Image (cartoon, rainbow, N blue to C red):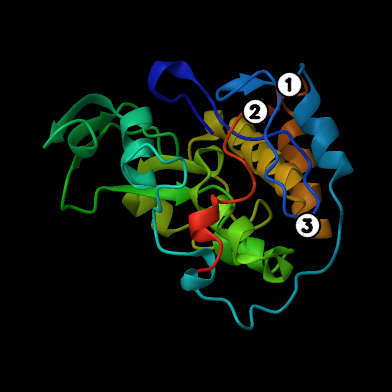
Amino acid sequence: MTRLKGGAVTAVAVLVAVSGCTAERTGDSGPGGTAPGGAALAAADALTVKGRAPKTGYSRDRFGAAWADTDSNSCDTRDDVLKRDLRDVRFTDGTCKVSYGLLDPDPYSGKKVTYRRGRSQVDVDHVVALSDAWQKGAKYWDPSKRIALANDPLNLVAVDASTNRSKGDGDAATWLPPAKAYRCPYVAAQVAVKKKYGLWVTAAEKAAMKKVLAACPDQKLPTGGNPTRAPERFRAR
């Protein structure tokens, strides 16, 4: 991820088993923290390599209702990310519903983008696309883990909508942000999320990740984030 509001970068550094029911939390660094220098390249090198599984059975609904309030703060996940990433934020009715803000700069394009509610100039992107996750392990998870991934702020970033639409469900082998200065933190965020959730990568994807991170060998691995299981009230969905 790129510079967020306050200059923070968030992603995750905990490797989590695919099975099990206990919600696991990250270490003491908390949201916006980072693991030691160089950790991103080492973590990328350690990711499991497998072939991409078929997309059969994938739908957005398999990851729960969009923008579920999994952190129980009474605001939906999308608005939480907008509040975190935008500058000069304004609200409608309280402090949850973001009505206005600025991406300055947008991490993917480097442009200054204005957010106004109801328009499509800003997306909240899954850094590791949900379809990509489905084909690299998430197909076999229980619903609570998929819901957690879809709403983990460490896998989410507010970005320019038009630039984001070119990404689709691409991984690092098929798409990188046009803003070259953001490629190292972007790939580091993907590595961190895949490490946390136990997702695998293809051989081409790992090679692409390592090529990007080799140009920034001191790139830290972002840390922090929500548990890898959604709260009990979401688990039966």
Q: Is residue 71 above or below residue 52?
A: above
Q: In 3D space, how far apart are the residues under numbered discs 2 and 1 (Cα atoms)?
A: 6 Å
Residue 15, quarter of the rendered image: top right
Q: Position of residue 1 (x, y in %)?
A: 54, 34
Instruction: Tell me the residue at 81%/49% (across/down).
Output: 207
| Residue drawn at point x = 65 percent, y = 67 percent | 134
Residue located beneath label 1 in the image: 35
Q: Which residue is mark 3?
A: 18
Q: Nearer the viewer, residue 18 or 120?
A: 18
**Pointer 2 residue:** 222
Judged from the image, the secondary structure of the residue bearing numbered disc 3 is: loop
Q: Are marks 1 and 3 in contact (CB under 8 Å)?
A: no
- Does residue 160 appear in the picture of this structure? no
Q: Toward the viewer: 13 or 190?
A: 13
Between the residue at mark 2 and the residue at mark 3, the CA separation in whole angstroms equals 21 Å
The answer to which image quadrant residue 160 occupies is top left
